[in-house]
Image (spheres, rainbow, N blue to C red):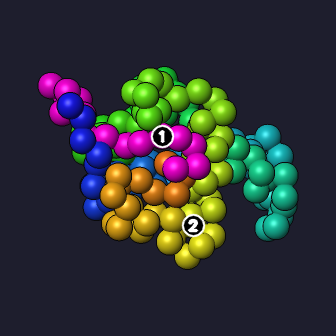
Amino acid sequence: PLTPASAWRRFAAMGYDLLLLAAVLFAVSGIAVAVAGGAIASGNVAFQLYLLFITYLYFAVFWKRAGYTPGMRPWRMRVERLDGGSLGWRQTVLRFSGAWLSLAACGLGFFWALWDADKRMWHDRLSGTRVVKDWSLYK
């Protein structure tokens, strides 16, 4: 049986994903600058929405297709619906939005897992998902 992943394990995976995401955002920013033909003004809302969409795609595509992000895999974790199934697009949107809500609350939604009996964060509860340890990864 799969057990819930600890908050500390999840924080470590978040650190990995943030490093990878920074590289992706750097690359797509370079593409945007090349397409724009020069510098993009700070505060450009279209550019900010573009980066937000790329960030969503980074997480959502991995969650939906593999069940884990590149940062989750070395820590042998995956995300699933409460019934054990794969996430749908609706759940990826709820999960991503819930993560931003958790961040907006000074990170409280992330630290919630430290006290939650099921070790679920706010975005897990909002999207009806859970993160479990999966020892079959990297076998």
Question: Mark 2 is on which residue type?
Answer: Leu
Q: Residues within 10 Å of mark 2 (few under 14, many from 20)?
A: few
Query: CB under 8 Å between callouts 2 and 1?
Result: no
Work out whether residue 27 can be spotted.
Answer: no
The foreground one among 139 and 91 is 91
> Which residue corresponds to the image point at 44% horizontal and 35% vertical from the top-left?
82
The foreground one among 84 and 34 is 84
Q: On screen, 25 above or below 100? A: above
Residue 54 position in % (x across, y down): 65, 42
The foreground one among 39 and 104 is 104
* Direction bottom: furthest residue: 106
Residue 29 position in % (x across, y down): 67, 49
> Which residue corresponds to the image point at 24% horizontal and 41% vertical from the top-left?
3
Residue 119 position in % (x across, y down): 35, 55
On whether residue 126 falls in the magenta region, the answer is: yes
Horizontally, is 135 left or right of 32 in the view? left
> Which residue corresponds to the image point at 43% horizontal and 28% vertical from the top-left?
83
**Disc 2 and disc 1: Cα gap in Å?**
18 Å
Quadrant location of the N terminus in the rendered image: top left
Work out whether residue 87 can be spotted.
Answer: yes
Residue 36 position in % (x across, y down): 83, 46
Q: Which of the numbered marks, if any, corresponds to residue 39?
A: none
* Direction left: furthest residue: 139
Pair 2/1: label in front: 1
- Tell me which segment is drawn in magenta: 125-139
The residue tagged 1 is: 129
Helix, strand or loop for disc 2: helix
Q: Which of the numbered marks, if any, corresponds to residue 103?
A: 2
Question: Mark 1 is on which residue type?
Answer: Thr
